[in-house]
Image: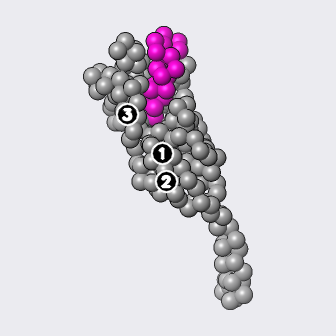
Amino acid sequence: MSQPFPSFDDNAAAQKARLAEVPARVALSLKVNGRTYSVQAPDDMPLLWVLRDLLNLKGTKFGCGIAQCGACTVHVDGRPVRSCMLPAANVGSREVTTIEAIAQKECGRRIQEAWLELEVVQCGYCQSGQIMSAAALIERNPAPDNAEIDAAMAGNICRCATYARIRAAIKLASRR
Ligand code: FES
Ligand code: FES
């Protein structure tokens, strides 16, 4: 037997329920790459979505969305953070640095030069996250050994398996 068409009242109730699901929006003031941005965003929107969709900073990538691949890594007050899982509303007054501005830091400039010199990149998708994690590593540990590099980079997955070149580039950057 065919289903009857929904009545006007059924449709109105469904519409009301959908509207009730729209998340509350909050006004955020975010410091990103040395600039202060004011945005309106859903109160649970992860920082990654704010960076890419509201601030048009597309260098930071979406991979897994569950803090398992490292593609979305940015710095928050200099520490590497998975931006796919961090609500932008929780950033507060801390400084966010993305791949677009990492070369302005000494550690980022050295890492990017080493990346270019050793031609680390293959498809490139994971590489902004790799560079952000590597820059944070040599910022806090200027001469990491293999075990320290592997530990710091373990959360950054590369489907092209550029791991050997990443390790070599971090060592090259740490010698400069
Ligand atoms: S997209 Fe954030 S860790 Fe994979
Ligand atoms: S370079 Fe292709 S996923 Fe890492």
Up/down of 10 relative to 110, above or below: below
Up/down of 135 relative to 81, above or below: above
Q: Residue at x 39, y 39 (%)?
A: 101
**Tag 3 secondary structure:** helix
**Tag 2 secondary structure:** strand
- Is 146 within the magenta? yes
Mark 2 CB in 8 Å range of ligand 1?
no
What main secondary structure does the magenta stretch of the protein show? helix
Decide: marks 1, 2 in contact (CB < 8 A)?
Answer: yes
Q: CA distance from mark 3 to mark 1?
A: 13 Å
Q: Which residues are magenta?
A: 129-150
Circle nearer the N terminus (1, 2): 1
Q: Residue at x 40, y 30 (%)?
A: 105
Residue labelled with disc 1:
32
Residue neighbourhood size for the residue with mark 3, other residues' Cα within 10 Å, grouped as few (<14), some (14–19), many (≥20)? few
Residue 102: x %, y % from top left: 40, 34
Residue labelled with disc 3:
104
Circle nearer the N terminus (2, 3): 2
Circle nearer the N terminus (3, 1): 1
If the image is split into quadrants, where does the C terminus sit? top left
